[in-house]
Image (tube, helix red, strand yellow):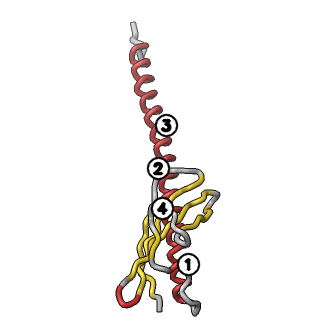
Amino acid sequence: MAKIGGFSLVELLVAMVIFSFGVLAGVALLGAGYRWEGQAELETQMTVAAEMKIEELKAIAGSEQDDTVQLVLGGDLDANVAEHWDTVELDRRVFIRRWLVEAGPAGSRQVAVRAQPLNPPAAGQAILWSYVIHE
């Protein structure tokens, strides 16, 4: 009598269980990838918001205008201090920006800007430092 080739029921079930675990791991990896992508996008937006403020302060410092209140020494990165904080909207997300202005070398100002998501709230922050030449 000839032997008929094929898989037994037990072999088929074991193969299906292994395949199922592989599919579930792939789905979990996709979900993690989407979360990482969202976090990376948020970090980029926070950095852009802080860079925008630094560029704005540099433009003010380089203008012919007298010193504006935004470049007056002071401010705080953790609390809202008058004329040293604002909000900006990027891609339907609102960020709060706070900056600290300190005296720098040779009459310059050292500026630190902190950007955090305000609406919708999320974890994270970006802090950037720069020197602003102000005469």
Residue 27 badge? 3
Q: Which of marks 1 and 3 is in front?
A: 1
Using a 10 Å C-alpha cutoff, classify the residue at mark 2 as few (fewer than 14 neighbours), some (14 to 19) or many (20 or more).
few
Using a 10 Å C-alpha cutoff, classify the residue at mark 3 as few (fewer than 14 neighbours), some (14 to 19) or many (20 or more).
few
Q: Do the residues labelled 1 and 4 touch (CB within 8 Å)?
A: no
| Residue under the point 40% across and 78% down | 102
- Relative to 70, say whether 8 is above or below: above
> Between marks 3 and 2, how big is the CA–CA gap?
14 Å
Q: Which amino acid does label 2 sit on?
A: Trp
- Please state the horizontal and vertical placement of residue 66, each as a whole percent of the image: 56, 90
Residue that badge 4 annotates:
79
The answer to which of marks 2 and 1 sits earlier in the sequence is: 2
Label 4 SS: loop
> Between marks 1 and 4, how big is the CA–CA gap?
20 Å
Residue that badge 1 annotates:
56
- Relative to 36, say whether 24 is above or below: above
Q: What residue type is labelled 1?
A: Glu
Residue 91 badge? none
115, 24: nearer the viewer: 115
Q: Which of marks 3 and 2 is in front?
A: 2
Residue 6 appears in the figure: no
Q: In which quarter of the image is residue 25?
A: top left
| Residue under the point 46% across and 37% down | 28
The answer to which of marks 1 and 4 sits earlier in the sequence is: 1
Residue that badge 2 annotates:
36
Label 1 SS: helix
Residue projecting furthest to the top: 1
